[in-house]
Amino acid sequence: MIVTDSLNVIFREMALDLCYRLQLYNELFCQSTAVVMSAVAIEDYAARAEAVQAVRDCSQALQLIYADLNQILDGRRIVFPPDIADWIWDQPNPDTIISQYLERLQSIAQSMEMSLNTEVSKMEVEQ
């Protein structure tokens, strides 16, 4: 019984840590979105390169959180969009493509947060 209680406490703390990291991700997401909007408005090469890097950083942060999520919740399979390329700005409607990319990342983050909250709620009901 003591071992089970200890495992439940550890699981709950890990889940809450991931929830906190997802909140930090949301802040990073907002910053990345602001950088992208700025790059779209300015149409400067340096601003565009910074925007692409911000989106990549955002994606990488979410993938790290996902890897940790899979350590405590088995069975969650999420397909991340392929890495965004520097030449995205040469495509027609690059702002739409980047917006869709960011929307997909936000959808993934929300799904992960919902899964974590569900698991934490289940544990609280069981206690």
Image (spheres, rainbow, N blue to C red):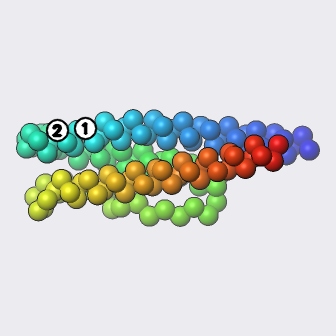
Q: Position of residue 108 (x, y in %)?
A: 45, 55
Picture quadrant of residue 24: top left
- Compare residues 80 and 33 and report the one nearer the observer: 33
Side of 104 relative to 38 (left or right): right
- Residue 85 appears in the picture as rendered: no
Which residue is at 18% across, 53% downward?
Answer: 95
Q: Position of residue 77 (x, y in %)?
A: 53, 64
Side of 79 relative to 34 (left or right): right
How crowded pointer 1 is (Cα within 10 Å; few <14, some 14-19, many 20+) is rated as: some
How crowded pointer 2 is (Cα within 10 Å; few <14, some 14-19, many 20+) is rated as: some
Which residue is at 82% across, 43% downward?
Answer: 127
Tag of residue 34:
1
Q: Amino acid at mark 1?
A: Ala
Tag 2 secondary structure: helix
Residue 88 in the image: above or below residue 29: below
Tag of residue 5:
none
On the rendered image, what quadrant is the N terminus found in?
top right
Side of 120 relative to 61 (left or right): right
Which residue is at 42% across, 44% downward?
Answer: 61
C-beta proximity under 8 Å, tags 1 and 2: yes
Which residue is at 40% across, 50% downward?
Answer: 106
Q: Position of residue 92 (x, y in %)?
A: 11, 62
Tag 1 secondary structure: helix
- Residue 47 appears in the picture as rendered: yes
Write down the residue under mark 2: 38
Q: Amino acid at mark 2?
A: Ser
**Which residue occupies the extreme front position in the image?**
125
